[in-house]
């Protein structure tokens, strides 16, 4: 163990701990932009500089491991002045777009500019202008807002193992590139969006849907597969407008394309919201089957279905539907035995719901005829 003193507070930490992490353990805040606790340190943004006794120049705390007896100062007028200059330099090549930016209110760069009181910029010069927009279906890439922190590149490589993007070109022309400068074509997991500290990467589906302050956050479980990742639904006026995941969950905040972006079905007018009971064939006037019965996509909502196929289905309450199912299952079981019945469950259910379903089939009905559509 190494003993290190930061801003007059002493702590014992394991060898290899960085100064930034040791400061975090002491609850001493150090501003960062490129650092992410789940990614390897980069030391790119230079905001986390600190002074270490005996070292002539400030060093980046995210890449400096502690040594025994080290004495660190995280904040003094000199350090804060340097940090402010770093921020001013970043902002000198950044569109002042906060009023219309999707990330406003949830942007680390905006927050730091606020705390350092940067209103006007001393540095004026050439600006990077990128007119081409990426045509991919999910992720808005606004490279003018990119501060080259590299988080997206690292998460795509180190967490997702895809490597769909990387730094390209040199000096002022540097930018985050896709292969051959084409539209992003990858897994679309959105991890890069989740770790981007600015509005350079946002979800296309979120555009102008609502500000963070208007959003109610609801924790839930992803309905798509048995991994059961934790989701945070961002709900505005009873509509899910965005999905994220918290870092302190089992899935550590990482999601796949379905969990992160495939939520429009929630508010789809095609969704069945009430049980429908099929009318016995003898009572039907034999109309054509609706598309979903034939195996095609439904494309019709509850009321449309009932209006158009009123001789096939009728709307029922949940109590009536459940009673009806119970009665029919009992009749079939008594007449043909439990193995005449089979149950098909769904990948959209949670692990717990699927567990209950198999329990119901095995213990309630008495059959092992159970299957499950493994993927959505
Ligand atoms: S990325 Fe942040 S600082 Fe830049 S325009 Fe958007 S909200 Fe403002
Ligand atoms: S969406 Fe996922 S796979 Fe695509 S660039 Fe971002 S992190 Fe990489
Ligand atoms: S796109 Fe976002 S995460 Fe990637 S380098 Fe730019 S600012 Fe950083």
Image (tube, rainbow, N blue to C red):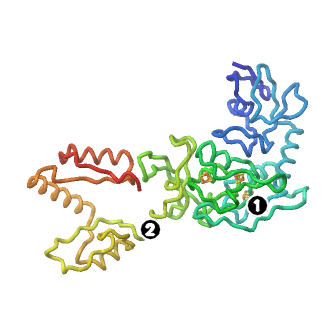
Q: Name the residue under label 2.
A: 268
**Number of numbered discs on residues:** 2
Toward the viewer: 158 or 233? 158
At a point 62% along the width and 60% down the height, the residue shown is: 139
Q: What element carries label 2?
A: loop
The residue furthest front is 180
> Looking at the picture, how far across and down is residue 208, in whole percent?
62, 67
Q: In which quarter of the image is ligand 1?
A: bottom right
At a point 25% along the width and 53% down the height, the residue shown is: 343
Give the quadrant of the N terminus: top right
State the separation of the CA atoms marked 2 and 1: 34 Å
Is 269 displayed left or right of 199 in the figure? left
> Looking at the picture, how far across and down is residue 342, in whole percent?
22, 53
Q: Name the residue under label 1.
A: 144
Quadrant in the rendering for residue 317: bottom left
At a point 50% along the width and 50% down the height, the residue shown is: 231
Q: Which of marks 2 and 1 is in front?
A: 1
At a point 68% along the width and 57% down the height, the residue shown is: 178
Is 62 displayed left or right of 54 in the figure? left
């Amino acid at each position: 163990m190494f003993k290190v003193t930061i801003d007059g507070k002493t702590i014992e930490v394991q060898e290899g701990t960085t100064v930034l992490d040791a400061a975090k353990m002491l609850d001493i805040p150090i501003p960062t932009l490129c650092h992410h606790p789940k990614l390897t340190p980069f030391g790119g943004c230079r905001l986390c500089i600190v002074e270490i006794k005996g070292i002539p120049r400030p060093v980046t705390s995210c890449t400096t491991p502690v040594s025994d007896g080290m004495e660190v100062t995280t904040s003094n007028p000199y350090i804060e002045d340097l940090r402010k200059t770093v921020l001013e330099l970043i902002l000198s090549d950044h569109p002042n777009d906060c009023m219309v930016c999707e990330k406003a209110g949830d942007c680390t760069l905006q927050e730091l500019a606020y705390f350092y009181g940067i209103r006007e910029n001393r540095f004026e010069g050439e600006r990077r202008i990128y007119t081409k927009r990426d045509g991919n279906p999910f992720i808005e890439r606004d490279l003018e807002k990119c501060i080259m922190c590299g988080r997206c590149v690292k998460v795509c490589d180190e967490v997702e193992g895809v490597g769909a993007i990387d730094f390209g070109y040199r000096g002022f022309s540097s930018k985050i590139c896709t292969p051959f400068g084409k539209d992003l074509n990858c897994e679309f997991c959105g991890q890069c969006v989740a770790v981007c500290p600015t509005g350079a990467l946002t979800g296309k589906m979120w555009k102008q849907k609502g500000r963070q302050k208007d959003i109610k956050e609801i924790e839930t479980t992803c309905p798509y597969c048995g991994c059961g990742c934790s989701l945070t639904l961002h709900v505005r006026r009873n509509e899910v407008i965005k999905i994220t995941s918290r870092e302190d969950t089992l899935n550590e905040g990482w999601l796949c394309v379905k969990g992160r972006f495939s939520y429009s079905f929630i508010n789809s007018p095609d969704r069945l919201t009430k049980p429908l009971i099929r009318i016995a064939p003898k009572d039907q006037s034999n109309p054509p089957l609706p598309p979903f019965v034939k195996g095609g996509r439904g494309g019709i909502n509850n009321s449309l279905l009932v209006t158009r196929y009123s001789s096939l289905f009728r709307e029922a309450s949940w109590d009536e539907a459940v009673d009806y199912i119970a009665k029919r299952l009992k009749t079939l079981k008594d007449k043909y035995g439990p193995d005449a019945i089979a149950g098909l469950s769904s990948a959209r259910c949670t692990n717990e719901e699927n567990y209950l379903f198999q329990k119901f089939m095995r213990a309630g009905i008495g059959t092992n005829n159970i299957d499950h559509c493994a993927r959505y």
